[in-house]
Amino acid sequence: MAKLEDLIKQIPDAKLRAEIAHEAAALKSTKKFGLVFEEHIPERVQLPGLPVRAGSRVVKRGNGKQVFQVVDIKGNTARLAPEPEGQEETAKLNELVIVKKFGEPIYPTLTPRDRVERAPDKPWHTIINADNFHALQLLLYCYEGAVDVIYIDPPYNKGARDWKYNNDYVDSSDQWRYSKWLAMMKRRLVLAKRLLKPDGILVVTIDENEVHHLAILLEQLFPEYLRHMVTVVINPKGTGKLNFARVDEYAIFCVPQTGTPLLSGNLIPQMTQPISDLISPEIGDYSEKEDDEAEVTEEEIIEKQQLMSVDTQNLPFPEEEADLWELRHARRRGNESSYRHQRKNQFYAIYIDPVAERVIKVGDSLTLEDNPSFESVDGLLPIWPIDDEGNHRCWRFIPDSMRKLVAENRVVLGRKNKKRETWTLNIWERKPTLKKVKTVWWTSRHDAGTHGTSLLHKILGRRDAFPFPKSLYAVRDTLSTICANRPNALILDFFAGSGTTFHATALLNLEDGGNRRCILVTNNEVSEKQSNQLNEMDLYPGNPDYEKNGICESATWPRCKYVINGKRDDGTELVGAYLSSQETTGQKKKGREMKYGFEENIEYFRLDFLDPNEVAYGEKFESILPILWMMAGAQAKRENDKGEKAWFIPTGSPFAVLIDEHAFSQFKQAIAKRTDLAHIFLVTDSMEAYRSMLAQLPDTLKTKMLYKSYLDNFRINTEQST
């Protein structure tokens, strides 16, 4: 297309050129550029909890792939018409399970399963056992534009039959393997983007199988974001790959361009230690304007050593503030924008008193045609920004700025360089409050074997719980780069796996006293081999004896519960201790013992589905209530209520529900007694009545109309929106 547009510009006839350009623009608007893949038919999900009725779409229990429509039901037998066409057949109702295509309206509810409470004054984390697409729809109702961090570790699509598309395991023989994976990811990422705050950040971990496809997909879906790729060494021994022993994987950060840095390495322990750091404290120019680091040279090593001899008797700041300041080179270094011809106003002499070893004054800039003079002036020796090889470099600032620094006593001499018969000049500057995050993470605590697989075995007491969990500390460090200054962050992981993200959030809260809240979403998939074995025993999804073998029931929830309590359900205390956040290179410091657990709260839900007519008639208040509790920030222990009174105002959660609109006056008086309320839900069928009540409530309250807002939200055809 680019070449076509170039050729169009060469057409001499203006009218013809304009007409062809118009047609080319129309073609360009319909043709995809960049990542092109097959947009597969919407995914389907089985809903074993819903009753089979005439008109329902169903599949046969087990690994049923053929979709049928129920024509009619007589007794316990259903007559089925295959889709899109085929010979009708019959089946027993208990052999069938409802399926929904993504894009069909669904009306979710959260069915409570279990909870752990150890910190009454802190918010509650949540786990949702669900297909993550439908869970994202639910979360959009609760948290659109409110999430600080989305961290996901999706299937890596290695062809190992480790994920499904429309109830089929995807393996290396599937010719649509890559496009199915991309279609699956796109649908979820489109919804996930809507959940992020304006300064919210998405992190996706991936390996070499899909990293390039994913990077282009993210570029298309997040074009206004900065995208950074971090290499994380997760297996120092290397895997048994052909040709190479792979040691790493990737974390792609999608960061909105807000004009200010959103990532911080302040809470991340040292990851690597350059050899030069063993000589003396690290120095250099790390400011935004001068991001041109050089290789370590002999000259730089000498200059680093010279910093050790700086006169500390004449500091430009109070001695008690010494830890807030550091010395940086006065001369620019590196290969970019550090030479005289690149910064013509920054080549000048700085005059020193060689006897008193003090900087006295700053000369004027030389033109490119002028040669520097090395003669003393009034006993003062000129120092020029010339390196050890004789290259004309430049100072970091123009003369006027440097004069101000000299007047503030911030420009100082290092030790004399006898080889060059000169001195190195350094500038006192306040240490940056923001430590930049490096793009290669190589530290033993990120070993997924030791701090992922082995750690999970220790927690659950069995070795077959979950394949390839992440290192707890790799996830902790990832979250801390974003949440260092967000102690109340809302964190979402909708490919939650074994629950490492919650574990890392709890650890981060422990280390800095934060109240970050984590939402985990994972399905309850059973491995293919085990599923086949259970099917032979006439056990299928929906049956408790089948479900207890799934990921969420057997790994995610037990892990979260055990690490909070510090022990398993049988009373066995967890053995070992966490690594301290003060860990330094080569030193693993012991942190909190695992048996003490965490002061956190968490509730476990299963996502089920409601009949919208029952919701509209107000018959499902108790089923809707957990969603309202989550929307209000999951504050305080969740309370149940059947909605039989005129209103419901929970004791500790900051929300209230008016159930009988005729009691609005009394309801207003009741909520006026609560200063903590943030969310108000008004049950009414009349938009006019809702607006009238809304006008009488404070503007500071977030108000929704029940059950209209719920039904309207989930009636949207989400497939079109993706």
Image (cartoon, grey):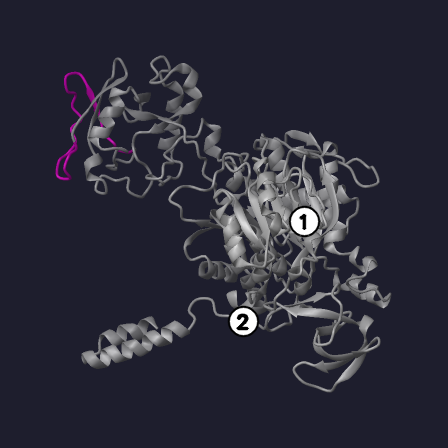
Give the camera-side residue of 66 and 58. Answer: 58
Whether residue 448 appears in this view of the structure is: no
> Residue lying furthest right in this view?
537
Mark closest to the chain's N terminus, 2 or 1:
2
Label placed on residue 589: none
Is the residue 69 above or below the residue 192 in the image?
below
Location of residue 146 in the rendering, given as x and y in whole percent from the top left corner: 52, 48
Give the magenta-colored segment's residue range.
365-387
Q: Is mark 2 on a helix, strand or loop?
A: loop
Give the camera-side residue of 312 and 669. Answer: 669
How dense is the environment of label 1, judged by Cα within 10 Å: few (below 14), some, or many (20 and up)?
many
> Residue lying furthest bottom in this view?
87
Check disc 2 and give the amino acid type: Glu
Residue, disc 1: 127
Q: What secondary structure is the stretch in magenta mostly built from?
A: loop
Is the residue 419 above or below the residue 101 in the image?
above
Residue, disc 2: 39
Location of residue 85 in the rendering, given as x and y in whole percent from the top left corner: 67, 85
How dense is the environment of label 2, judged by Cα within 10 Å: few (below 14), some, or many (20 and up)?
few
The CA distance from mark 2 to mark 1 is 30 Å
Q: Is mark 1 on a helix, strand or loop?
A: strand
The nearer-to-camera label among 2 and 1 is 1
501 horizontally vs 71: left or right: left
Whether residue 333 appears in this view of the structure is: yes
Check disc 1 and give the amino acid type: Ile
